């Protein structure tokens, strides 16, 4: 049976109250990580600009603490923006796709890219990597900020998209590692079939075999480590 510490339960409750834009403005790589940090006392509960002042109040109520001001060192509360790509300038480098935490950008290498506005959380993370500065953030909720500009349903949809993307990235990484391992095993087999006659050739062949065998063993240990990490 999986055992949860009290702070794990609290982290779940905190996470349910966060906007799930996955913008990292709180200083953590995801809303989940920030929730864990608040629960274990290593982060304050006023560091989430997308949640704004109401978000601070929601967390204060849950934590039975006073409502304090949003810490603007992490960003200002603002109307919610959506990313817009000026497609005529896009060079199709895919850097924005790689940066988007919720897969809200469509495109392929060397093709124009476009944002699906309904999926965009307004996190800003695609703006900085764009080498031609063709991504603009356009406000879509003038006069409304924080939770007034973002619904519970949008938060849950974004969380789902984020988790879905993380699973996809993990799967792609695993598939790539398996492909490389199969390639290395085939190379090793081919080497074994190679004839080597002189002492130098034999030495060279053994050296190559040792390098490939070591690489295969490293990959095996890495896989084991990842599997035991997933199981815990
Ligand atoms: S919405 Fe952004 S700032 Fe708020 S908790 Fe999530 S990642 Fe952090
Ligand atoms: S399109 Fe840009 S702003 Fe919108 S969610 Fe993706 S990375 Fe964030
Ligand atoms: S980062 Fe900029 S140039 Fe590259 S694909 Fe995205 S929008 Fe186009």
Image (cartoon, helix red, strand yellow):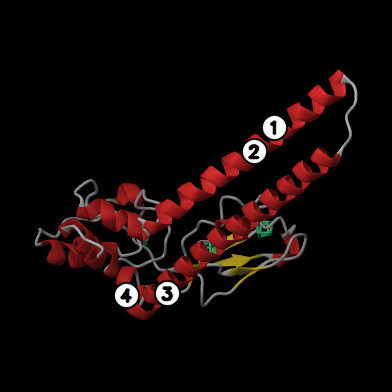
Viewer-closest of 109 and 66: 109
Residue 94 visible, this angle: yes
Dot 2 or dot 3, earlier in sequence: 3
Quadrant of the rendering where the C terminus is positioned: bottom left
Dot 3 or dot 1, earlier in sequence: 3
Dot 2 or dot 4, earlier in sequence: 4
Q: Nearer the viewer, mark 2 or mark 4?
A: 2
Q: Is mark 3 within 8 Å of ligand 2?
A: no
Residue 50 shown left or right of residue 158 in the figure: left
Residue on which disc 3 sits: 141
Residue 86 shown left or right of residue 231 in the figure: right
| Circle number at residue 148 | 4
Dot 3 or dot 4, earlier in sequence: 3
| Circle number at residue 215 | 2
For image coordinates 52% across by 43% down, the residue present is 221
Q: CA distance from mark 2 to mark 1?
A: 6 Å
For image coordinates 50% across by 62% down, the residue present is 166
């Amino acid at each position: 049976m999986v055992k949860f510490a009290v702070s794990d339960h609290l982290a779940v409750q905190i996470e349910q109250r966060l906007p799930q834009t996955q913008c990292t403005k709180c200083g953590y790589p995801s809303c989940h990580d920030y929730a864990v940090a608040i629960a274990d006392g290593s982060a304050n509960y006023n560091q989430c600009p997308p949640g704004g002042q109401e978000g601070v109040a929601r967390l204060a109520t849950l934590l039975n603490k006073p409502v304090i001001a949003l810490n603007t060192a992490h960003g200002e509360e603002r109307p919610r923006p959506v990313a817009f790509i000026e497609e005529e300038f896009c060079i199709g480098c895919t850097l924005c796709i790689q940066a988007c935490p919720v897969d809200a950008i469509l495109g392929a290498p060397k093709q124009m890219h476009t944002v699906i506005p309904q999926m965009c959380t307004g996190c800003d993370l695609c703006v900085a990597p764009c080498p031609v500065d063709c991504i603009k953030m356009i406000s879509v909720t003038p006069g409304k900020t924080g939770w007034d500009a973002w619904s519970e349903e949008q938060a849950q949809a974004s969380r789902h998209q984020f988790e879905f993307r993380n699973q996809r990235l993990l799967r792609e990484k695993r598939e790539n590692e398996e492909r490389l391992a199969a390639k290395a095993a085939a190379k090793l087999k081919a080497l074994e079939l190679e004839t080597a006659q002189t002492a130098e050739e034999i030495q060279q062949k053994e050296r190559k075999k040792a390098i490939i065998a070591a690489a295969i063993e490293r990959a095996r240990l890495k896989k084991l480590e990842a599997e035991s990490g997933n199981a815990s």
